């Protein structure tokens, strides 16, 4: 299928309407609009938060702006390419993509291949780009789970075997992520997988039992690392003397940013916390800069945009499910859950509702890996929406019995 042969949902074919209607403006796709809005606003805030850091690291205040702008352009190209790829293709190669992600997760643990930053081996240095396999694992696990559930819905619903098979794969990926370590990716992967199983009709008692066992295992792994326990306790009272200049430092500086912003903020570019007070201000704690420079109003607007995006993704999933296109439905559910979980955790960390954890805010935080995967997910979601609207669906009665 060529790029030009695909009729995208927001592009109206001139031959589809009489000549009198050719000049009519086609409706703008709301998923496109919210994605571009988040990326545009994120670019502005990220630039404001990173100018001083760029000056000190590269003698260029716009260093991070230029790099993020490049990744935005590349991300938009990826979205357009993905829009031409049928959902059937993702279904057929879902198991291959999952195997690839597992191989890459193993590769980052091999000395000489994996790059260690701040004690975590999460990247593979390609010279021109640092690849982070944990980011792509989120999407590739969604593809695999969606393909599995579209074939084995009855098995997942009726017996333990169908339920345990994806749990084994999830367990392997969790172990690999723990060895990096990347606890944020573990939480997102588990939450997404459990949600997809629940929506596929897994019986509640099996679902609850597996959740209890899984989270007990994660808690046990966390207890083995003292700094994880320290983070879990410091966020309860970050202002305490033993935490305020240690584990609680980032949170206290983030809360100061929220306090300075009040209702309408101090204005774009006027943040003080970005001046080396708040670590990772342009990545994990970008929301705190949003709060300081645009106030509570800006934070609420960002939250509304994410809520709209997640709601639209759920709407696409429900429409596909009603039409019997279970693969498209579960993919859309999974993408919605990734965005929801990552946004919830980032908001919780920045406001002190959750323990401090390095996790980017989709589309707003600086970082090529996160942004490109988010664009890839949006491209897949837009393609699923297009197939639902045009009826080009891979209905369950024609799903291939792939292992």
Image (cartoon, helix red, strand yellow):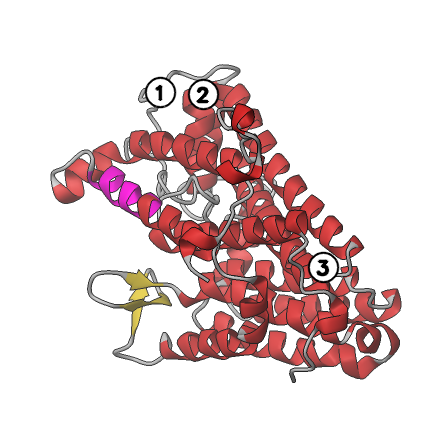
Among the 4 quarters of the image, the one containing residue 290: top left
Among the 4 quarters of the image, the one containing residue 31: top right
* In this rendering, position of residue 204 left or right of residue 97: right
What range is drawn magenta here? Answer: 63-72
Q: Quadrant of the C terminus?
A: bottom right
**Real-space Cα separation, disc 1 to disc 3, in angstroms:** 38 Å
**Residue nearest the observer in this picture, 80 or 7:** 7
* In this rendering, position of residue 271 left or right of residue 327: left
Kindly indicate whether the residue at mark 1 contacts the one at mark 2 (C-beta within 8 angstroms): yes
Q: Which residue does the image show at 85% across and 80% down from the upper left?
A: 159
- Between disc 2 and disc 1, whose residue precedes? 1
Q: Which residue does the image show at 57% across and 32% down from the upper left?
A: 305
- Determine which of the numbered discs, if any, sits on residue 195 in the image: 3
Decide: is 203 above or below 364. Answer: below
Q: Position of residue 112 (x, y in %)?
A: 25, 78
Neighbourhood count class around disc 1 (C-alpha, 10 Å): few under 14, some 14–19, many 20 upward:
some
Q: Position of residue 307 (x, y in %)?
A: 63, 36
Q: Residue furthest front?
A: 19
Kindly indicate whether the residue at mark 3 contacts the one at mark 1 (C-beta within 8 angstroms): no
Helix, strand or loop status at disc 2: helix
Q: Which residue does the image show at 55% across and 48% down from the upper left?
A: 382
Q: Which residue is mark 2?
A: 294
Q: Nearer the viewer, mark 2 or mark 3?
A: 3
- Determine which of the numbered discs, if any, sits on residue 374 in the image: none
Q: Which residue is mark 1?
A: 268
- Between disc 1 and disc 3, whose residue precedes? 3
């Amino acid at each position: 299928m060529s790029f030009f042969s695909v009729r995208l949902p927001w592009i109206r074919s001139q031959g589809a309407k009489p000549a009198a209607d050719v000049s009519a403006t086609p409706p703008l796709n709301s998923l496109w609009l919210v994605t571009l809005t988040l990326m545009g606003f994120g670019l502005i805030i990220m630039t404001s938060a990173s100018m001083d850091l760029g000056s000190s690291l590269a003698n260029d205040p716009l260093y991070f702006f230029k790099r993020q702008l490049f990744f935005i352009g590349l991300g938009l190209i990826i979205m357009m390419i993905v829009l031409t790829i049928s959902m059937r293709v993702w279904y057929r190669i879902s198991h291959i993509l999952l195997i690839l992600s597992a191989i890459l997760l193993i590769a980052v643990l091999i000395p000489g291949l994996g790059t260690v930053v701040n004690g975590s081996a999460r990247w593979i240095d390609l010279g021109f780009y640092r690849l982070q396999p944990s980011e792509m694992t989120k999407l590739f696990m969604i593809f695999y789970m969606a393909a599995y559930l579209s074939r084995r819905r009855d098995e997942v619903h009726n017996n333990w075997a169908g339920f345990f098979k994806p749990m084994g794969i999830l367990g392997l990926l969790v172990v690999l992520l723990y060895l990096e370590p990347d606890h944020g990716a573990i939480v997102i992967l588990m939450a997404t997988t459990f949600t997809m199983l629940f929506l596929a009709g897994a019986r509640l008692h099996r679902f609850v039992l597996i959740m209890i066992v899984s989270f007990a295992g994660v808690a046990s792994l966390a207890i083995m690392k003292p700094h994880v326990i320290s983070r879990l306790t410091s966020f309860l009272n970050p202002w305490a003397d033993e935490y305020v200049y240690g584990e609680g430092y980032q949170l206290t500086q983030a809360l100061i940013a929220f306090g300075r912003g009040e209702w309408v903020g101090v204005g774009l570019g006027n943040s003080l916390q970005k001046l080396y007070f708040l670590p990772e201000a342009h990545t994990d704690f970008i929301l705190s800069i949003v709060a300081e420079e645009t106030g509570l109003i800006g934070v609420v607007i960002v939250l509304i945009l994410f809520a709209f995006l997640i709601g639209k993704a759920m709407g696409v999933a429900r429409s596909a499910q009603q039409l019997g296109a279970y693969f498209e439905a579960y993919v859309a559910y999974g993408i919605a859950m990734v965005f929801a979980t990552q946004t919830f955790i980032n908001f919780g960390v920045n406001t002190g509702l959750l323990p401090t954890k390095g996790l980017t805010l989709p589309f707003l935080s600086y970082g090529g890996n996160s942004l490109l995967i988010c664009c890839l997910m949006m491209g897949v979601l837009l393609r699923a929406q297009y197939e639902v609207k045009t009826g080009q669906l891979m209905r369950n009665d024609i799903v291939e019995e792939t292992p």
